[in-house]
Image (spheres, rainbow, N blue to C red):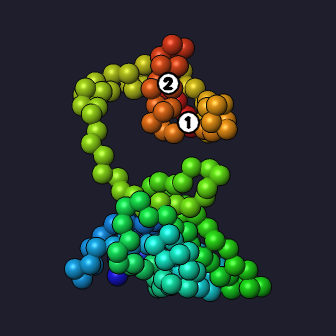
Amino acid sequence: MALLSKQDIYLFNEGSHSRLYLKLGAHLVTFEGHAGTAFAVWAPAAEQVSVMGDWCGWNRSAHFLHPQEQSGIWAGFVPGVGKGACYKYHIRSRYQGYRVDKADPFAFYSEIPPLTASVVWDLDYQWHDQEWMARRREPNSLSAPISIYEMHLGSWMRVPEEDNRSLTYQEAAPKLAEYLRRHNFTHVEF
C-alpha cells in the first residue's frame, strides 16, 4: 500500500513534486477494508526503516517500511493506527551501523517539547475566512504598502508560569494578530 504513484516518484526524483505533503508523512487511509495510517519518509542512506509508536510499545521492529523504487522513500501501511497516535521512524543507515529514531519532517502535528514524537493527524479543518478571501487582492496588490514582521514563533512569547513553554498555534494566533495590527504590520514571516 502506498500513496505514491509512479508519477509521484518520477516528479520526486526530478525535484519538481510540488505537493509532497500529500504523499510523505502519516496519512489516515483505508486499505483493503482496514482503517489505519500510511507512512512514508525519505531516507536515502537507509538500509532499513521502520515506524514505531505508542500503539506497539515503541517496538522498533514491529512495522517495517519498504523502499519505493529508486527514490530513497520508504513507505508502508499500519492497520488500526488512528488520529492521535504518537510515532517516530527508526532508521538503520547503510553506513557504519548508525541507528537513530527520528520525528517525521512531514508531520502535521507533534508532541509539545520536551517530548519529540510526531502525532498522526489530518488537515480536516473548516476555514472561516471567506470575507478575507473575497477582499485579499487589494491589500496584497503590488502597489499596496508592505511592512513585514520577521519572527521565530517558538520564542516570540512564552508562558513563564508553565515552565516557560512556547505558545501553541491556537494560543499564539489571536495575540500575534493583535500585536501585528497594533504595530501596523501587513505581513508576518515565520
Q: Is residue 126 left or right of residue 157?
A: left
Q: Residues within 10 Å of mark 2 (few under 14, many from 20)?
A: few
Q: Position of residue 31 (x, y in %)?
A: 27, 78
Q: How many marks?
A: 2
Q: Position of residue 2 (x, y in %)?
A: 36, 78
Q: Is residue 190 above or below residue 58?
A: above
Q: Quadrant of the C terminus?
A: top right
Q: Secondary structure at mark 1?
A: loop
Q: Amino acid at mark 2?
A: Lys
Residue annotated with mark 1:
167
Between 137 and 128, the residue placed more toward the observer is 128
Q: Is residue 176 above or below residue 111?
A: above
Residue annotated with mark 2:
175
Q: Position of residue 152 (x, y in %)?
A: 63, 36
Which residue is at a point 56% across and 61% down the rendered structure image? 117
Q: Is residue 112 left or right of residue 5?
A: right
The residue positioned farthest toward the right in the image shown: 96
Between 82 and 41, the residue placed more toward the observer is 82
The answer to whether any part of residue 1 appears in the image is yes
